[in-house]
């Protein structure tokens, strides 16, 4: 899946509605478990991180214990894993609804756009329902006429994961 | 009365090499109440690590054994555990998760306490009796017992408890092997994984020292390791399981993954190899070859009864957990590492941790799924009554994928709940 952006667009000219369309499309891929296509949204040097909630939000995974700190390789392995029947935590697949709102472009240059938005994601599996919520921080870039994710950082608002238990889906 | 309400908690048949645990133990509210009284109120429970309180005034609040605790260091460097309840009306005095403070003020009526919990002042002091402040009941109460071993602080709510070092017993030597990995001392690495499972806490005890489930539960993790260039050695997964007495148990084994404590994998590069070689040479000089090899090449999943797990595996993790109800547990997990460790080694340590462990890892979520489905399966406990923990029972030296270390837990658990040394046929 790719989101149509104006021909000849570069990171420097991306508009908020274009970014919003992209984020909605990303959410749809996740809710439909089209994870290999979702992975294609990322650049080769991309990162995907979820820090714990008892350290500063800008802390580094090199000297702090995160929930998730994937480079592009491990993110690919995460997707590969989640598509297997032996990824027991997500088999049968849970149902999810990824919601994004309050989308803002924080900064923008010729190479990339820094985006923040609020999110809440509902997950249901077996008899359990979970809600994840917080803020998403993206660095987006444009290559070959499509928007790509250079980094995605999920900043949870909850104190840890007492309600959710685990992060076995992609947020 | 439920049909299994009168079953023994644990049933042992030594002749037939059978060890059965009643599924009622995982669901019965009466068992839960007795556990609070006979286990979480009398055993030594892990509170935190000294490295979490680096500076005078540092504090951490934490729920331990169902109680709200303020763990802090005063300006003289004394480390304390206080019940985080105002002596006046009971409000939690400190509402921050961690920080640094010279004093603690309860916001409800404004009482102020020192770092030692002593009442310093309160609004309207003149309306109280003249020796009100001298009454110990005016102070925040200290937890009856607080002792430490190798930087690990444990508390106990039973003033009569035996000393911590005696309680640790044979587990002490394993803690030494783990904590001797560092000469400057271990530290908790920033960031706590705080998660939960809809499962009885004893399921996580078993799972944390279970060498039997890896190939089926963690198939995708093993796939991942195999596919990763240079991620594995050809060392076999092999070792022993041990009952250490007093409810403690361990599995100790070799494994193919890289260990920042001394087993290099090619993924870590030449520089990583030099560092690991230097570490092993240092340990050999300090401790002799036999112990240095054990530090480097042996993995340990250690259970300190009832609920502390120290996994010295592809990373070093300290994990403790508490039941909220028979079918819900809360987990706190930390990564630990030597203070003297290089930035590169720290990075590998954390990367190793995240691949396998924790609620976002490639393995732990599948453990959680398994334990939650055990708990769901216990809906049938009235008809399908027993768990089997017999594996390796007749063997002189049970292997790491046998269950001797779990039987150690269950024997002690049953002894404490029933007050009897004899497990078979005993009831709580």
Image (tube, rainbow, N blue to C red):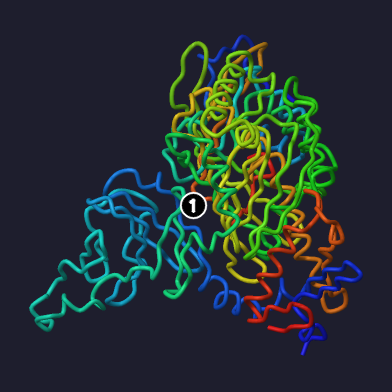
From this viewpoint, is residue A133 visible?
no
Hey, which quadrant is residue B141 in on the image?
Answer: bottom left
B385 w.r.t. A51: above or below: below
Q: Which residue is mark 1?
A: A159
**Where residue B333 sits: x, y (%)?**
55, 49
Q: Secondary structure at mark 1?
A: loop
Which residue lies at the image location 64% right of the left edge and 60% below the top edge? B248
Q: Is residue B133 left or right of residue B67?
A: left
From this viewpoint, is residue B222 visible?
yes
- Comparing A12 with B296, the one in front is B296
Q: Is residue A62 left or right of residue B388?
A: left
Quadrant occupied by the C terminus of chain B: bottom right
Hey, which quadrant is residue B121 in on the image?
Answer: bottom left
Which residue lies at the image location 63% right of the left edge and 53% below the top edge? A165
**Where residue A51 sits: x, y (%)?**
52, 38
Quadrant occupied by the N terminus of chain B: bottom right
């Amino acid at each position: 899946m790719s989101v149509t952006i104006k021909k000849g667009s570069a990171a420097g000219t991306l508009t908020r509605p274009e970014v919003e369309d992209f984020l909605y499309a990303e959410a749809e891929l996740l809710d439909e478990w089209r994870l290999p296509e979702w992975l294609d949204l990322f650049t080769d040097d991309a990162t995907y991180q979820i820090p714990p909630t008892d350290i500063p939000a800008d802390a580094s995974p090199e000297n702090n214990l995160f929930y998730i700190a994937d480079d592009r390789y491990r993110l690919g392995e995460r997707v590969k894993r989640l598509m297997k029947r032996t990824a027991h935590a997500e088999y049968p697949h849970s149902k999810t609804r990824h919601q994004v709102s309050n989308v803002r472009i924080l900064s923008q240059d010729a190479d990339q756009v820094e985006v923040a938005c609020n999110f809440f994601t509902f997950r249901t599996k077996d008899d359990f329902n979970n809600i994840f919520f917080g803020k998403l921080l993206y660095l987006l870039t444009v290559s070959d006429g499509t928007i790509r994710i250079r980094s995605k950082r999920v900043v949870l608002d909850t104190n840890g994961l007492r309600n959710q238990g685990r992060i076995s889906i992609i947020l | 009365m439920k049909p299994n309400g009168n079953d023994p908690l644990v049933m042992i048949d030594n002749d037939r090499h059978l060890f059965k645990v009643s599924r009622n133990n995982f669901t019965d509210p009466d068992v839960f109440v007795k556990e609070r009284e006979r286990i979480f109120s009398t055993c030594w429970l892990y509170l935190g690590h000294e490295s979490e309180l680096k500076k005078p005034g540092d504090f951490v609040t934490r729920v331990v054994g169902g109680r709200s605790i303020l763990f802090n260091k005063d300006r003289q460097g004394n480390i304390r555990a206080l019940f985080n309840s105002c002596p006046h009306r009971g409000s939690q005095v400190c509402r921050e998760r961690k920080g640094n403070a010279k004093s603690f003020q309860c916001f409800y009526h404004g009482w102020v306490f020192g770092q030692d919990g002593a009442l310093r002042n309160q609004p309207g002091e003149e309306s109280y009796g003249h020796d009100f402040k001298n009454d110990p009941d005016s102070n925040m109460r200290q937890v009856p017992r607080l002792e430490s071993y190798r930087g690990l602080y444990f508390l106990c709510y039973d003033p009569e408890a035996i000393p911590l070092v005696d309680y640790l017993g044979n587990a002490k030597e394993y803690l030494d092997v783990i904590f001797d990995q560092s000469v400057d001392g271990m530290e908790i690495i920033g960031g706590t994984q705080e998660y939960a499972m809809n499962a009885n806490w004893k399921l996580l005890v078993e799972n944390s020292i279970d060498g039997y489930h890896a190939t089926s539960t963690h198939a995708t993790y093993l796939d991942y390791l195999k596919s990763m260039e240079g991620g594995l050695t050809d060392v076999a997964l092999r070792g022993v399981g041990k009952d250490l007495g007093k409810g403690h148990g361990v599995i100790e084994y070799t494994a193919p993954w890289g260990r920042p404590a001394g087993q290099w994998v090619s993924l870590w590069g030449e520089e990583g190899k030099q560092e690991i070689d230097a570490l092993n040479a240092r340990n050999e000089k300090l401790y002799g070859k036999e112990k240095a090899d054990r530090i480097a090449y042996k993995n340990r999943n250690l259970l300190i009864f009832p609920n502390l797990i120290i996994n010295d595996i592809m990373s070093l993790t300290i994990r403790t957990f508490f039941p909220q109800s028979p079918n819900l547990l809360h987990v706190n997990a930390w990564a630990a590492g030597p203070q003297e460790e290089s930035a590169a080694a720290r990075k590998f340590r954390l990367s190793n941790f995240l691949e396998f462990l924790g609620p976002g890892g490639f393995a732990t979520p599948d453990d959680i799924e398994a334990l939650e489905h055990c708990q769901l399966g216990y809906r049938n406990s009235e008809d399908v009554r027993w768990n089997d923990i017999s594996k390796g029972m007749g063997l002189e030296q049970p292997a790491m994928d046998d269950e001797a270390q779990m039987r150690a837990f269950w024997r002690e658990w049953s002894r404490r709940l029933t007050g009897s040394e004899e497990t078979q046929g005993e009831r709580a």
